[in-house]
Amino acid sequence: MDIAHNTVITLTYQVTDPDGNLVDAGEEPIIYLHGGHDDIFPRIEEELQGKQSGDTILVKLQPDEAFGEYDAELVQIESRENFPAELQVGMQFEGAPEGTAEDDYVIYRVTEIMSDKVVLDGNHPLAGMALVFTGTVSNVRAATAEEIAHGHVHGDDDIDHGHDEILH
Ligand SMILES: [Zn+2]
C-alpha cells in the first residue's frame, strides 16, 4: 500500500544533528495519520508521500522546518522567591510570555539557578538546530473513519484515548 492521504504510517526513525551526533534514538516508532493532520513535520510527510513499507527516507530539516528558530525573547529571568524551595535545572513551568494573551502558554525550562534569580527558557530544547531525520516505513494501513474524524491515530491499547499526540 502506498502512503497517501488518510493512511496510518508506522515509522522507525533516528534523528541526528548535521555532524551525525545522535539527538533522538527513536526507541519507540512514530505512528501517525498521514495527510496534513499536523501529526509530523510537513517536510517529512512530503518525503513519505507515495512511499511503501520498507522504504527509507532521509530528510535534512532546517530549524524553521523542525522545532523553530531560537528566540532569545523566550529567555526570562525571574526572582528566586517566585519558585518552590525544591528547584532543579530542567524543571518545567507553564507561563504566558509578557505581552501575549493569557492562554498563550509556553513551557519554560529552568536552565540556571542563582541565589536570588532563576533563568527560564521557553524555547524547545531543539530550537535553533538543524536536524537530519532518517526514517524507515515499517507499516502502512488505511485509517479508520473514526481516526479520520478525530485527525489522529487510535492505538490498539486505546485505554487512555489521548488527544495530546506527543511527537515534539
Ligand atoms: Zn481520538
Image (cartoon, rainbow, N blue to C red):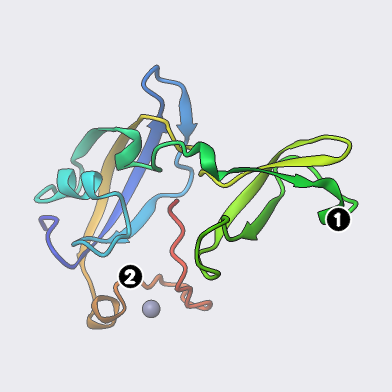
Q: Do the residues labelled 2 and 1 touch (CB within 8 Å)?
A: no
Horizontally, residue 58 falls left or right of residue 21, namely: left
* Residue 80 visible in this rendered orientation of the protein: yes
Name the residue carrying label 1: 84
Q: Which of 95 and 129 is in front in this view?
A: 95
Query: In the rendered image, which quarter contains the N terminus?
Result: bottom left
Total count of labels: 2
Name the residue carrying label 2: 152
Q: Position of residue 123 (x, y in %)?
A: 52, 43
Q: Where is residue 105 in the image (x, y as percent from the top left)?
A: 54, 62
What is the residue that sits farthest to the top in this orientation?
Answer: 19
Q: Residue at x 34, y 69 (%)?
A: 153
Q: Does the residue labelled 2 lie within 8 Å of ligand 1?
A: yes
Q: Residue at x 21, y 36 (%)?
A: 57
Q: Label 1 neighbourhood size at 10 Å, few (<14), some (14-19), many (20+)?
A: few
Amino acid at circle 2 = His
Amino acid at circle 1 = Pro
Horizontally, residue 156 falls left or right of residue 122, namely: left
Q: Which corner quadrant of the image does residue 139 belong to?
A: bottom left
Looking at the image, residue 71 lies above or below residue 36: above
Horizontally, residue 155 falls left or right of residue 72, namely: left
